[in-house]
């Protein structure tokens, strides 16, 4: 059964179309405005959108541009409903790959036949994409079995994996340090640095659910996707969160997710701003006093709600000389500090290690040693410190 989104500001027209399509075996959702149309399309990902060319709150071409900018809606069939007087505008809508149109007042039989044809084609495309994704995951599982079977191949993959890790940039007035320790020979943690322009550096720390080869493959995809989101949205953190969540929700295997924190450092104004999605709270370190920066936000890739990113908090501060911001994955706080595995290092351990760090010593090295990560870590461990000197 296909799902059709009916978008028309006339309630009577929507009711008539809903009745006709329901009798033809389609499920229906409705929208009366352009904004409702976009939100309903994002939430439901319909098999076809039946769109009136004139809605009260937005120009049709602007709405079509917004719909097509959504990755999940790029290939959704859109049929336009237009009166004879709207022919010139209707022709311009075809630049956004409109699959068909119907004139008002519409011929019911022709409308139902067209919708049936387009939804069948779209369902066939979705089925084909699902098969492709299943084949992709099957290849990952096969690769994991092959790599497990071959020590030589594991060593080669490990060498490339290490080589691919980004190097921290050198910035006058700052010191950036990285500690990256995969739990196995290949890890699901990731991090990245990318310059958005000459003054703004984006920094990412993330953790893909799971372990082994599959997590290593997925973390590479997640790292590049989040970096693309930050570049595409020019460092606008909430837009980047929405972009990344939408793409990851579409592409991650069922049940998988990505915990991450990413922020932007303005090296001229010394301003730091970040968002956090399911990873431990970043730390603001003043001298040797650490303050967890409590920032709301769950993991990426679990919710398809169009407004999900509004639940993600952001935090901003000015980094003074001698101060530091630290990002970390949960492998540090979840490391066990006794042999019976009853007590974790936890945030308190991180805070204490920071307080115990000698002058001029590396904070993240002290944390690493205090948690004894080489012997007690049960997960990948990643830390990045951004210190203003």
Image (tube, helix red, strand yellow):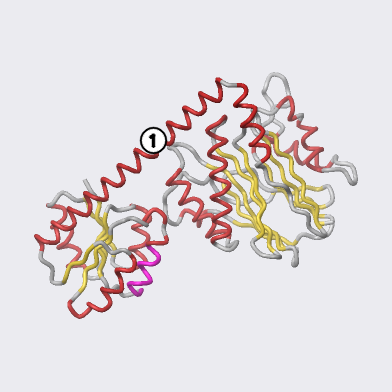
Residue 79, percent across and down? Answer: 24, 63
Residue 64 belongs to magenta span: yes
Residue 289 to residue 140: above or below: below
x 25%, y 79%: residue: 88
Residue 175 belongs to magenta span: no
Q: Which residue is mark 1?
A: 134
The residue nearer to you, when weighing 191 against 307, is: 191
Quick one: label 1, few (<14), some, or many (20+) residues within 10 Å? few
x 68%, y 43%: residue: 328
In terms of image quadrants, where is residue 48? bottom left
The residue nearer to you, when weighing 157 against 105, is: 157
Q: Residue furthest right?
A: 359
Quadrant containing the C terminus is: bottom right
Residue 1, percent across and down? Answer: 21, 45
Residue 170 to residue 57: above or below: above
Residue 33, percent across and down? Answer: 32, 68
Count of numbered circles in the view? 1
The residue nearer to you, when weighing 126 against 359, is: 126
x 71%, y 42%: residue: 383
Q: Main secondary structure of the magenta part?
A: helix
Secondary structure at badge 1 equals: helix
* Magenta part of the chain: 58-67
Residue 386, percent across and down? Answer: 75, 52
Left or right of 295? Residue 181 is right
Residue 211 to residue 321: above or below: above
The residue nearer to you, when weighing 298 against 377, is: 377
In terms of image quadrants, where is residue 21? bottom left
């Amino acid at each position: 059964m296909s799902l059709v989104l009916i978008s028309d500001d006339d309630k009577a027209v929507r009711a008539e179309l809903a009745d006709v399509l329901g009798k033809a075996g389609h499920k229906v959702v409705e929208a009366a405005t352009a904004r409702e149309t976009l939100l309903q399309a994002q939430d439901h990902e319909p098999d076809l959108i039946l769109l009136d060319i004139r809605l009260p709150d937005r120009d049709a071409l602007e709405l079509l541009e917004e719909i097509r900018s959504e990755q999940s809606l790029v290939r959704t069939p859109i049929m336009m409903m237009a009166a004879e007087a709207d022919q010139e505008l209707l022709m311009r809508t075809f630049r956004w790959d409109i699959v068909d149109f119907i004139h008002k007042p519409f011929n019911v039989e022709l409308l139902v036949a067209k919708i049936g044809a387009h939804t069948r084609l779209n369902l066939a495309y979705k089925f084909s994409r699902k098969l492709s994704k299943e084949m992709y995951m099957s290849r990952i599982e096969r690769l994991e079995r092959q790599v497990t079977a071959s020590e030589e191949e594991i060593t080669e993959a490990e060498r490339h994996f290490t080589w691919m890790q980004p190097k921290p940039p050198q910035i006058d007035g700052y010191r950036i340090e990285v500690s990256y320790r995969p739990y196995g020979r290949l890890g699901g943690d990731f991090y990245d640095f990318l310059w958005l322009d000459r003054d703004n550096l984006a920094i990412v720390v993330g953790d893909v659910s799971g372990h082994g080869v599959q997590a290593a493959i997925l973390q590479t995809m997640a790292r590049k996707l989040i970096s693309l989101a930050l570049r595409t949205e020019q460092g606008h953190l909430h837009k980047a969160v929405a972009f990344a969540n939408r793409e990851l929700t579409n592409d991650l295997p069922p049940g998988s997710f990505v915990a991450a924190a990413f922020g932007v450092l303005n090296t001229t104004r010394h301003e730091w701003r970040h968002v956090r999605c399911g990873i431990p709270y970043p730390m603001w370190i003043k001298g040797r006093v650490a303050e967890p920066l409590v920032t709301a936000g769950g993991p990426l890739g679990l919710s398809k709600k169009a407004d999900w990113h509004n639940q993600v908090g952001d935090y901003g501060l000015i980094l003074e000389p001698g101060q530091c911001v630290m990002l970390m994955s949960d492998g540090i706080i979840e490391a066990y500090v006794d042999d019976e595995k009853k007590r974790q290092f936890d945030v308190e351990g991180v805070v204490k290690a920071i307080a115990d760090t000698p002058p001029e010593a590396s904070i993240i090295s002290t944390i690493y040693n205090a948690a004894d990560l080489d012997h007690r870590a049960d997960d990948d461990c990643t830390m990045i410190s951004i210190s203003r000197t």
